Image (tube, grey):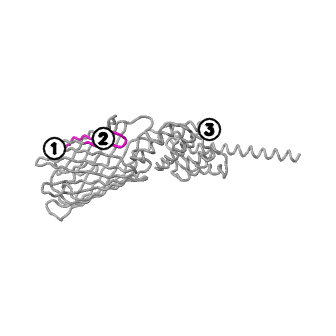
Amino acid sequence: MLCIFLGLFARSQDTAYNELSAVSFEEARNLAYEGDFRSANVMLTQLVKPNSKDHDARSLLASTYSWSEEYDKARDEFNILISSDKTDRSVWIASIKNELYANNNATAIGLANKALVHLKSDDEVERLKAIAEEGVANAEYPESGWFNQDDSVVSKEEALLVSAEKKPETVKPEAIDTLAAKTPLGEEVFNNKISVRNAATVFDQRYDPIYYSSISFKRQTLAGSIIPRINYSNRSGANGVQYDLDFYPKFSKRFYAYLNYGYSSSSIYPEHKMGGDLYVNLPGAFEFSAGGRYISYETKNVSVISNSLGHYRGNYYFSLRSYITPLSDNLTKFSGNFLVRKYLKDAENYLGLNVGMGFSPELRQLTSGDELLAETLLYVESQRVSLEYQFTGKKSPNIYRANVGATRQELAFASGKFFYGVSAGVTYEVKF
């Protein structure tokens, strides 16, 4: 009787423990899909003990670490899972995605190679490997990236979207491996973008404020991106409009180009401006470009030689660009910009710092990105610094960008004397 009692008691304890574990895992899974990763993580940590065989709980624990940007902890859990079962496709894919979230492209390539040894062949692993290789080679960020493709592994964005569209209690446990809700970027391919920009610069002396506005339309084609743009400027009571066209032809994964043409009949813009650069992606996540600019004024024309060197390292991008202007008196003017960006959750969310100095055309009312243009042929010394912050909406792919900057510039009519300016601007981009 004693043996029977003890046996029944032990069996009831195991049953109670298993039922508690099932309920806890279900609740943890629901919390994870509600976006409460921290609470889910606490519950899953209790379920996953040393030498635990609960594969599903450990897999979800690793995912919550990854979604909470604790990539090292996620990597440790994925390693345990892979060591116990080297043929689990979903774990391999989730582990590779964790490294892509962390921008560890080289590690992602290594994991993909190991996965292919055990899985023999897999289209999704091959796709993730290709994205990682592209990130190492040229640091490009495709809009249809690893975080918004339809596959059997749910990403952080996908989990949050499932929460919004479907209550957690309606999601069945057996469906956890088949949920593949897409982010807004993944629901359709955005080949078009409309961008509106407004900015102003005020000075501490002599010069009146300068106001800028522009509206552009970007169309992605098979040949590359085409961007027609209308620029408006108001300076010293004079209004001017410039019509601009950018084209980015892509020749291969390693080579692409930038071409530009602008026209204006206004006195505060050059009548014609043309430019171009050829870009090449080098090993080690470096990028080099070389090209030139040609600016036609009413009285004289200006030719400028441009070149740049960029490098992607982790979440950071560094770019050094110079402009060399040969003059007829055998003198050469130089100016340059140094740009640093820290990317946040993806390539469209970042913080940036831009520092420029050197001799450049007087008065900066004409700008195109970090390129300096002007309506006069006076060359003056200047120093410039600006900060920018770009982010996307929580529920839409639209982009917001804000920038502020300060300038110290030599007076054109008084060599060695300087004036100061402060600028600010906002940009809104709509994708469709």
In which quarter of the view is residue 28 placed?
top right
* The C terminus - image quarter: top left
> On the image, numbered disc 1 is attached to which residue?
271
> Is residue 249 located in the magenta-colored stretch of the structure?
yes
Question: Which residue is found at the position 15% from the left and 56% from the top?
Answer: 378
The spot of residue 67 in percent (x, y) is 52, 47
Q: Amino acid at mark 2?
A: Tyr
In this view, the residue farthest toward the left is 299
Which is more foreground, mark 2 or mark 1? Answer: 2
Determine the residue positioned at 12% across, 49% down: 300
Separation of disc 1 and disc 3 at Cα?
66 Å
Horizontal side, residue 17 vs residue 133: left or right: right
Q: Amino acid at mark 1?
A: Glu
> Where does label 3 land, which residue?
173
Tag in front: 3 or 2: 2
Residue in the image at 27% along x and 51% along y: 307
The number of discs equals 3
Q: Secondary structure at mark 1?
A: loop
- Tell me which label, 2 or 1, sits earlier in the chain: 2
Q: Counting other residues with Cα less than 10 Å from the Cα at mark 2, is it few (<14), some (14-19), or many (20 or more)?
A: many
Q: Position of residue 161 (x, y in %)?
A: 50, 40
Element type at mark 3: helix
How far across and down, in percent of the image, does residue 225 sit? 32, 38
Mark earlier in primary sequence (3, 2) = 3
**Mark 3 residue type:** Pro
Q: Quadrant of the N terminus?
A: top right
Circle 1: is it few (<14), some (14-19), or many (20+) Cα within 10 Å?
A: some
Q: Earlier in the sequence, mark 1 or mark 3?
A: 3
The residue that mark 2 highlights is: 248
